[in-house]
Amino acid sequence: MFRALATASPSAKALGQPAKQLLTAATRRHLSWVREEPSEPHVVTSAVPGPASKAALEKLSALQDTRAATFVGDYAKSTGNYIVDADGNVFLDLYCQIASIPVGYNNTALIAAAKSDQMATTLANRPALGVFPSTDWAQLLEDSFMRVRPPGMDMVFTTAHGSDANELAYKAAFLRYARKRRGARAFTQTELESVMDNIPPGSPEVAILSFSAGFHGRTFGALSTTRSKAVHKLDMPAFKWPRAPFPQLQYPEDAHREENAAEEKRCLAELDRILQRNEVPVAAVVVEPIQSEGGDRHASPEFFRGVRRITAKHDVLLIVDEVQTGCGATGAFWAHEHWELETPPDMVTFSKKMQAAGFYHSREMVADQPFRNFNTWLGDPARALIARAIVSEVLDNALVEQVRGTGDYLLGHLRPLAIRYHRLVANVRGQGTFVAFDCPSPAMRTELLDLMRREGVNMGGSGEVAVRFRPMLTLTNRHVNLFLTRFESVLNKMYKKHWPQ
């Protein structure tokens, strides 16, 4: 069934009428990234990586560690939702540079921004934004990041990458905590001297609380809040900061409402207990709307509203890490919008699909003196120019609305497959196209991902056994059909191999 649909142009039958209407209304004004795409994936090598990728990786390995590399991309030839590798294999990309490509490879609007005179000036004259901002910087912030600022956020602190965004948000939280304790008094001589030895009172004992299985980056402060995989942290000194349990939901959710509600209640009670009794005071709690690297772990909006109520009760800041969930992938521009909070978070960090990084905040988070939360670049105007083009593409083409329709279509087809192929596909879950399922073991997942690449679909894993979908916002039901055809083929192959009858 899916093969026939995949080779046809998008139609009411293939897309479903609601999705067809979304696609027509949303993308009619800017369909170049669809028209120029290949009609379907095409793999020319017997294995991935192929010989050209292997040769390129061997050359690169003399200069950098390449052991994590899957294949070598040919980005000049990649288009829209398709990535081309060094061997000429054409993959439908559902992984998208670890969730970081929002509107397609070689998107014409982004290419135009890259070729603009404003970009050339920016690249040739990168400013130290904290001390010598450019004449157009304020307007560029308004036209890019602030155009999609989350509710309650007045300002944006631009940074280099996702870990950096979280790291500097933590610093803002610590500075706010110290300012509230110190009040209007000046620094004492003891504080000024002790801080140079990394001891109190100048270097106080204070913490950021994170959740089990969370991932917030690999820089030192961020790494101390990362709890997803031991290998990320092993052999690295870390702050002795607390962690709270994150709910481990059971699926399908409709069949486990009582168990999931009890699990979330347990986790909230433990969070409240830690904030009350932790030996080190907690300045902020950091949480992902969906624990992405930790295995695509979800929780209900009510759980997150509970987190907000508890942090407010203890006068602890709430930092929402939207590095991976932000920019539309869950069917809202910011995933925490699904929670419908009465009081907004104190800070929201972002990166990946925004192609730039930083954190939104209220004016209360501004340090009491300049240079206290600071670095040379404080972001990059070149990345802000690309972010401006991305935001325009997303909003002008109603891509967040399209994500909702495509996500419903994807989940609607994955759930029946999980019943039919229950030995390989379990716990289907997701919001928008931010979707995942579990395999029975890490080895089975590795085999499945390898076979999918041989079929021309690039996917990735998360946690120990999850397979995650991180497509672009431009994914349509037609792309889903292409995936489903190949996915069912792989499932059949694996069933015949592991469970012959």
Image (cartoon, helix red, strand yellow):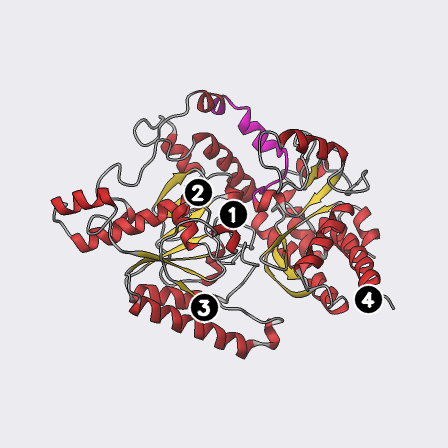
In front here: 271 or 317? 271
Residue 325 placement, left or right of 72: left
Residue 208 placement, left or right of 367: right
- Tag 2: Cα neighbours inside 10 Å, few (<14), some, or many (≥20)? some
Residue type at mark 3: give it. Phe
Residue type at mark 4: give it. Trp
Question: Could you tell me how far apart the alpha carbons at marks 2 and 1 are, in whole angstroms?
Answer: 12 Å
In front here: 449 or 302? 449
In terms of secondary structure, where does tag 1 sit? loop
| Residue 142 locus on image (x, y percent) | 40, 38
| Residue 441 locus on image (x, y percent) | 67, 62
Q: Earlier in the sequence, mark 2 or mark 1?
A: 2
What residue does disc 4 label? Answer: 499
Quadrant occupied by the C terminus: bottom right
Quadrant occupied by the N terminus: bottom right
Q: Nearer the viewer, mark 4 or mark 3?
A: 4
- Report if the CB atoms under discs 4 and 2 are less than 8 Å apart: no
Write down the quadrant of residue 433 in the picture: bottom right
- Tag 4: Cα neighbours inside 10 Å, few (<14), some, or many (≥20)? few
